[in-house]
Amino acid sequence: METVFIFNIIILILSVVAHELAHGYAAEHQGDPTARLAGRLTMNPLSHMDLMGSFIVPVLLSLIPGGIVFGWAKPVPYNPYNLKNQRWGEVWVAAAGPLTNVFIALVFGLIIRFNEVLSLSMAVIEISSMVVFINILLAVFNMIPIPPLDGSKVLFGFLSYKYNYIKEWLSRNSIFILLFFILFLWRMMLPVVFLLFGLFTGIDLG
């Protein structure tokens, strides 16, 4: 059990690092060097670790019966005013993180699907399953349209100016809305996570 927990933490840390790196590289591609100048375009996990999100929260969640390993890294800094495309640049930067997690999940899901051809050990299949589940969970959670999650930036990018009051209300109350969601509504994500897990791996968790 301890070994599984350690692997879950390692996978989580590497997945959130990949998520944040994707934001940084997307911003760099859009003309903003902020992340690079801050030394955050690196695979070194120590540069991205957040004490609360990368260690304390995952450990506490793992102690809750039926809980899941989940967390986050320090957000990669970027300046939206440096982006070449002021209309859609921030949307692409925001979406890059969850899309990277989906890509990672898809790659390891294909490894599981082609197991008979690859003749992989059960240990590799189990680790691959953890990678798929954690990355899908990260992608789905981050696409929830509550600031400061990526989904809110994607939503705001599609809203016309006449709906700015929605952006302002969500931003003003984001901490309370997000806390309420994490405490009481997070299980609403699981059917979507299970569905995507099944599509990627062929394994039904329902």
Image (spheres, rainbow, N blue to C red):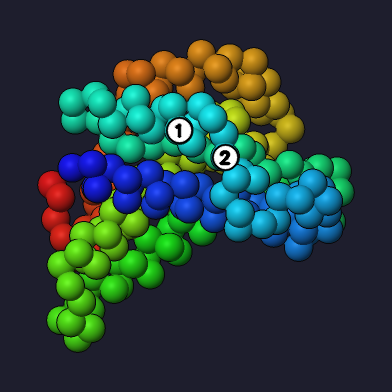
Q: Residue at x 40, y 22 (%)?
A: 181
The x and y percentages for residue 6 are 32, 45
Q: Give the residue type at disc 2.
A: Met
Q: In the picture, residue 129 is in which quadrant? A: bottom left
Q: Residue furthest bottom?
A: 117
Q: Are marks 1 and 2 in contact (CB under 8 Å)?
A: yes
Please report whichever mark, 1 or 2, sits nearer to the chain's N-terminal start: 2
The x and y percentages for residue 138 are 43, 45
194 shown above or below 161:
below
The x and y percentages for residue 65 are 18, 26
Residue in front for this viewpoint, 11 or 158:
11
- Along the horizontal axis of the image, is 174 left or right of 93? left
Instruction: Say the numbered circle drawn on residue 49.
Output: 2
Residue in front for this viewpoint, 75 or 201:
75
Q: Residue at x 70, y 26 (%)?
A: 164
48 shown above or below 32:
above
Q: Sort mark 2 into few (<14), some (14-19) or many (20+) by Cα contacts within 10 Å.
A: some
Q: Residue furthest front?
A: 2
Q: Residue at x 60, y 58 (%)?
A: 43
Q: Residue at x 54, y 55 (%)?
A: 18
Q: Secondary structure at mark 1?
A: helix
The reply to whether residue 98 is in sight is: no
Q: Secondary structure at mark 2?
A: loop
185 shown above or below 73:
above
- Along the horizontal axis of the image, is 76 left or right of 86? left
Q: Give the residue type at disc 1.
A: Phe
111 shown above or below 197:
below
Q: In the picture, residue 47 is in which quadrant? A: top right
Query: Which residue bears the numbered disc 1?
Result: 55
| Alpha carbon separation for disc pair 1 and 2 | 8 Å
- Along the horizontal axis of the image, is 11 left or right of 79? left
